[in-house]
Image (cartoon, coloured by chain):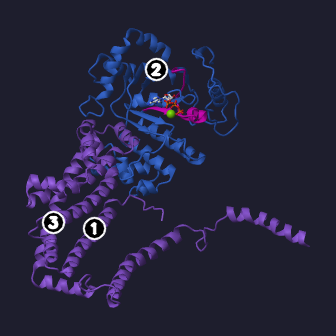
Amino acid sequence: MSASVDAPENATVDGVSTVDGVATADRAAATLDGFPAPAEPAHGVGNTDEVRGAAEAGYVVEALGVRRVFNGRAVLDGVDLRLRKGNFVALLGPSGTGKTTLLRILGGLDTADAGRVIVPRVRSTVFQEPRLIPAQRVWRNVVLGARRPRAARRRATDALAEVGIAGHANAWPRTLSGGEAQRVALARALVTEPDLLLLDEPFAALDALTRIRMHDLLAALCARHEPAVVLVTHDVDEAILLADRVLVLSGGAIALDQAVDIDKPRNRDDPRFLALRATLLEQLGVARTVGGGSTEVAASGHHPVDRNPTTDLH
Amino acid sequence: MTTITAIAPDEKAAAKAPLNRALIDLSPNGRGRVVAMRQRIRFWGGWTLRVGVPMLLIVFWQLALNWHWTSEDTLPSPKTIVEAYKYLWGNGSLQDAIPVSLRRAGEGLLLGGSAGLVIGIFAGLWKLGEEIFDATLQMLRTVPFIALVPLFVTWFGIEEPSKLALITAAALFPLYLNTFHAVKGVDQKLIEAGKTFGLTGFQIARRIIFPTALPGILTGLRFACSFSLLSLVLAEQVNATAGIGYLIINAQNNQRPDIVIAGIWIYAVLGILIDFFMRGVERLALPWRARVGIG
Ligand SMILES: Nc1ncnc2c1ncn2[C@@H]1O[C@H](COP(=O)(O)OP(=O)(O)OP(=O)(O)O)[C@@H](O)[C@H]1O
Ligand SMILES: [Mg+2]
């Protein structure tokens, strides 16, 4: 799996060192600022060398040296991330390390202060909360991004059927349960057939049972639609179950980039699963290993950061 | 014996008190149930109060006359007022007056209301609009529009234009303020969600902001309606040659309190009709809103 993706260390050597930070920041802004201008070219036919280069190399996401400063504090400082079509990465990291910030930059909701950010034009996001429009019926919410929602009604009902709540197409969002609303949000994100799917702790508010169902659902939908996926989560098991690569964000950069070489469907009792979980928990600064169940990363202030983790792994 | 009885109730109370304080019976026939009780209070309270209080007032009014607390010359009886309506209808002045007044209020409402709506949307959606209009309108808003009467008379004369101007001004502000706040107050998170799906600014406004802001806009419309009625009454006090206000002023000059009261009643009924109408509009336009209240 990791063979299809450059390790960030390599990427740094390839691209970033040759690129002047401020100038690329402008270009990155140009890639994202037009959002949501319809005239923006589809990815791969961009107007800058950077966009063309990324497309030719087969990347759908190329974020290099991403820096974001809040109140004089660099929350992100040199994040490198490259994704190809169908790559599923999980992003772990203690609370407040900038996972959401990175996702917002990739989604076009925020602009990096420096670095290069090249993303597909068609992308969608599932937030921690469903963020449905209360004044629109469920099916209208699903086709929120469609050019002509009425004409897309069929697609909305299909997408709702895919996530297993076709019966609620005509309901108002207020009447949905938390899990149902989150499934609507997932349907809404997938109905546009995005090239990049950004998930910010989408299942954090769900009960364990619904969460397991949603994992299966997400895995199946991603296998079918093949978007590049970035999943932010605090649940190490969730990350290992779903992702091809697990990244740990720490100290403003990707501190660990670990391929998950376990055959799907993955079993929590698999020794490789357990080994990987132990590695990740250690990386996250959580010493104990909890048997069974899912293991949440505690939002502790203390987490030893290994900036060159590859030596520790394998 | 005495010691025992002195202690026993205390123990009892100690055992009972936390229970009484901690538990509440919410079963359908229990005493603590909230929803059913409230519904019943709202239903009976609503209807008895809504119908009962005016009825009582009318009865009291008639009794006050019967008991000679006041005279027919000061306060004509309800019966006399019904007679006044018959008289006004008979000579055709009622049929002439009501459309004239409704038209005045309607035109002012349409003009001022749409201006308020458009400016409110503009200022709510664009920073530029807010900078241009908001400070100015917030400042003007503090001027009671009644104070504008002399100014409008000097500007537009005492004929129709000054009446229209007053009603327009009265309708503009409530709709502006409520629209502006409703549009600005739309949850930023929803707008972000729209942005991630690549919606254009126009699409975000149409699909997310307006539907979500509609309750606030309708509140503004409701206020604009009552304000235009209020300013109608005021405008018609100044040199009216037609309309309900003209009827009232004329009757006042002719010492006909029955017709004066009849005219005031028309205003009141108009107010009630507006309220009724707006309730219907809100019910139709906002089916997605939970009707939750605190009593
Ligand atoms: N708009 C902002 N203005 C100022 N500071 C911000 C802003 N957004 C984020 N931050 C800061 O950046 C840091 C990273 O925030 P972010 O939301 O990305 O964390 P996170 O990794 O998603 O954490 P969590 O796991 O708790 O969701 C936090 O310290 C936060 O206070
Ligand atoms: Mg976050």
Looking at the image, which residue is at 14% across and 82% down?
B88
Chain containing the residue with disc 1: B
Q: Residues within 10 Å of mark 2 (few under 14, many from 20)?
A: few
User: Residue B224 versus residue A305: which sits nearer the camera?
Assistant: B224
Which span is picked out in magenta? A228-253
Chain A colour in the picture: blue
Of discs 2 and 3, which sits in the foreground? 3
Chain B colour in the picture: purple
In the picture shown, does residue A37 fall above or below B38? above
Mark toward the start of the polypeptide (1 vs 3): 3
Residue position for label 1? B277
What is the three-letter code of the residue carrying label 1?
Answer: Phe
**Side (left or right) of B171 relative to A159:** left
What is the three-letter code of the residue carrying label 3?
Answer: Glu
Task: Tell me the element at label 2.
Answer: loop
Marks 2 and 1, how far apart in space?
55 Å
**Side (left or right) of B32 relative to A287:** left
Residue position for label 3? B236
Mark 2 on the same chain as mark 3:
no
Of discs 1 and 3, which sits in the foreground? 3
Marks 1 and 3, how far apart in space?
24 Å
Please identify the quarter of the rendering in which residue B231 is found. Answer: bottom left
What is the three-letter code of the residue carrying label 2?
Answer: Gly
- Disc 3 within 8 angstroms of ligand 1 (CB): no
In the picture shown, does residue A136 fall above or below B26? above
Query: Where residue A311 appears, x then y in whole percent?
Result: 61, 14
Query: Where residue A63 appears, x then y in whole percent?
Result: 41, 21
Task: Tell me the element at label 3.
Answer: loop
Is A246 part of what is drawn in magenta? yes
Task: Tell me the element at label 1.
Answer: helix
